[in-house]
Image (cartoon, grey):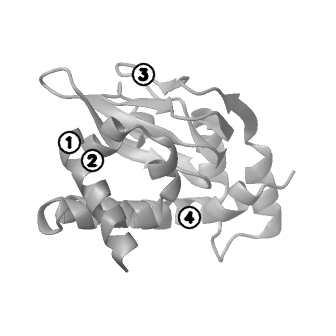
Amino acid sequence: MTSKALEICYDFPFFLQEELDEIFQAHEKVSFQKGDIILEEGKTANEYYILEKGLARSYVNDFSGNEVTTHFFADNEIIIEVLSIFQRIPTQENIICITDCECWKFDYETFQELFHKIPNLREWGRAWMSKELFVYKQRSVEMFTLSATRRYLNLLEQKPQVVQFAPLKQIASYLGVTDTSLSRIRKEIVSHSKKN
């Protein structure tokens, strides 16, 4: 069993081939349909997924009951709610499929077993967590230091499928702007690109 998504996610220089084979075999292929809930608020995550094809998002409900998108998951990324799975606590987030999704599921018990058995998996985990921490930190700083237009352009560059498949409202909440502001930003970008 070999999958491009698994190879990309577990791309770590110190893995031996037999270690990778064992890790890959521990994943189970699963499919979700558009609108399927992968993880629901109040439940504890018992697995994470490698997204081979599709688009998903995580969101919370704010104090007024509005959905606020916290993250978009695209091809070859890990769909995970880190706090819930590793702290074994109920999540505050929901994870839902925006499109049909093809995934590889890795359940918590098997992960724990291999985590203790394969030292390189622990090293990969540390490297992955460091990278993710950097990404989240950068995003939180950019929310205050970059204009909404720049944040939108960054999203367009980094995850074009979000702009292609996610509803305007979800993208706007992720960028921290209103739907109206985002519509205006998109119009300005289109008219600007036509002039050039």
Which residue is tagged 4? 124
- In what quadrant of the picture does the C terminus appear? bottom left
What is the CA distance from the residue labelled 4 to the residue labelled 2? Answer: 40 Å
Determine whether, in the image, residue 78 is placed left or right of residue 141.
right
- Frontmost of labels 2 and 3 is 2
Residue type of the residue flagged with mark 2: Ser
- Report the residue that reaches farthest toward the bottom: 196
- Residue on which the image places disc 3: 40
- Residue at the disc numbered 1: 180
Q: What residue type is labelled 1?
A: Thr
Structural crowding at the residue carrying mark 2, measured as other residues with C-alpha within 10 Å and reported as few (<14), some (14–19) or many (≥20): few
The amino acid type of the residue labelled 4 equals Trp
Looking at the image, the residue that sits furthest to the right is 1
Q: In this view, does 53 lie above or below 136?
A: above
Corner quadrant of residue 123: bottom right
Alpha carbon of mark 2 to alpha carbon of mark 3: how far? 30 Å
Task: Indicate the secondary structure of the residue bearing disc 1.
Answer: helix
Q: Are marks 1 and 4 in contact (CB under 8 Å)?
A: no
* Residue 66: x %, y % from top left: 21, 25
Amino acid type, label 3? Glu
Task: Give the mark, 1 or 4, whose residue is nearer the N terminus.
Answer: 4
Which residue corresponds to mark 2? 183
User: Mark 4 or mark 2, which has the lower sequence index?
Assistant: 4
Could you tell whether 195 is left or right of 113 in the image?
A: left
Disc 2 and disc 1: Cα gap in Å?
A: 5 Å
Q: Which of 116 and 186 is in front in this view?
A: 186
Secondary-structure class at tag 4: helix
Local secondary structure at mark 3: loop
